[in-house]
Amino acid sequence: MKKRKRKKDDTIVEWIDRMLQESDPSIRKVPGYREQLRQPFENAMGYLEGLISSIPGPFSISADQWDKDPLTHSLFVDPNEVKSLLQKCAELKSFFQTTGVKTAVALLTATKKERTIFGTGMEGEIIRRDVPQVAVEFYDHRVVAPAASEDENRQELVHRGLYVLASNALEEFMRIKSLIEELNGERRILDYKLKIHTTRERGIQRLLAGSLEPDSEIEQARQLLGEIDKQLMEFEQGSGTPKDFLRKLEKILFSAGNFLTEKAITMRLDWMGIKQDDVSAESGNEINLAELEIPDRAKRVAVLASIDAGECLS
């Protein structure tokens, strides 16, 4: 029991360090960072494992199967599109060349677009023209995270999900850090300008020139300096430091569902990619996809794909 717990603890430490190495290693300067991240990390891991396990597949993807397999036919325009994707995927090609395995399991994603077209349709025994229909198209296909097995692939996808979460924290952290640095830079310039003015007032220039008229630029500089100080005071104490990044990362890991979501999609498409309703369902093939979304940024459909090395290296 203790041995199993120690192994789990070692795995958590390894995953935390890997996540930080790929986002911001400076967080390691914060004492006790691993212990502080342990619970939020386990929370995010549990969420991501559930999300990744919901992705359908793996399904065999092959150019030769395009006119036989409903999923491949729905996702791709023709066999050449399948062949082009697999042969041009550098990550997939490198995986096969490096490992020597014959089959890989990878995440296949694409952007889904639905548009209304007008075609012919049956209403009872009557053929109608100009019937509105929904055509479903998939484009911008990508293959990522190839692995030798489904388990290894899903584990790698969990890790990449953690990186997405860490990237959100890092992006917010860097935005605030850059803003603070910019404000401090402007403050230094204004401070130097005011010091130069004060030195001139007290120096020989005043003795020679007599009383100096108020300088509108100096007054403007003083006002701007006050505004900058006010903005800097609005930031939390310690903002822009590794400890601040740790706080942001902890918060995001505890609320992983706000930053990466998954929704199951089931649809029936005929051989032309037209969505079928319940009445005409017998003429379509059912396909199951996962819709992965980073809110307000990206939304793509996904399945796990099983790919033979020959499809990529031939």
Image: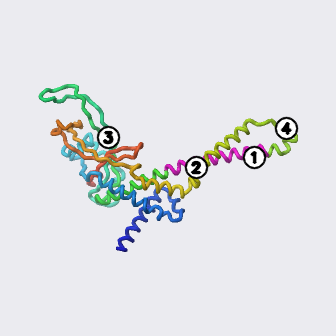
Residue furthest bottom in the image: 2
Of the image marks 4 and 2, the number of the one nearer the N terminus? 4
Q: Position of residue 238 (x, y in %)?
A: 58, 55
Of helix, strand and loop, which one carries label 1?
Answer: helix
Q: Local crowd at mark 2 within 10 Å, few (<14), some, or many (≥20)? A: few
Is residue 20 in sight in this rendering? yes
| Residue on which the image places disc 2 | 235
- Magenta-tinted stretch: 171-198
79 lies above or below 12: above
- Three-letter code, disc 3: Lys
Name the residue type under label 4: Ser
Q: Are marks 3 and 4 in contact (CB under 8 Å)?
A: no
The one of 249 and 16 positioned closer to us in this rendering: 249
> Marks 4 and 1, how far apart in space?
18 Å
Is residue 191 rendered magenta in the image? yes
Residue ID at (47%, 55%): 249
**Foreground: disc 4 or disc 2:** 2
Which secondary structure type mostly characterizes the magenta part of the structure? helix
Residue 203 vertical placement versus 163 (above, below): above
Judge left or right: residue 240 versus residue 128. right
* Mark 4 element type: loop
- Give the amino acid at mark 1: Lys
Q: Are marks 1 and 3 in contact (CB under 8 Å)?
A: no
Identify the residue under disc 1. Answer: 195
**Which residue, given by chain and number where applicable, does mark 4 sit on?**
211
Cα–Cα gap, marks 1 and 2: 26 Å
Query: How far is the residue under mark 2 from the one under mark 3?
Result: 41 Å
- The residue identified by callout 3 is 112
Q: Are marks 2 and 3 in contact (CB under 8 Å)?
A: no
Q: Is residue 59 magenta?
A: no
Q: Is residue 33 above or below residue 293?
A: below
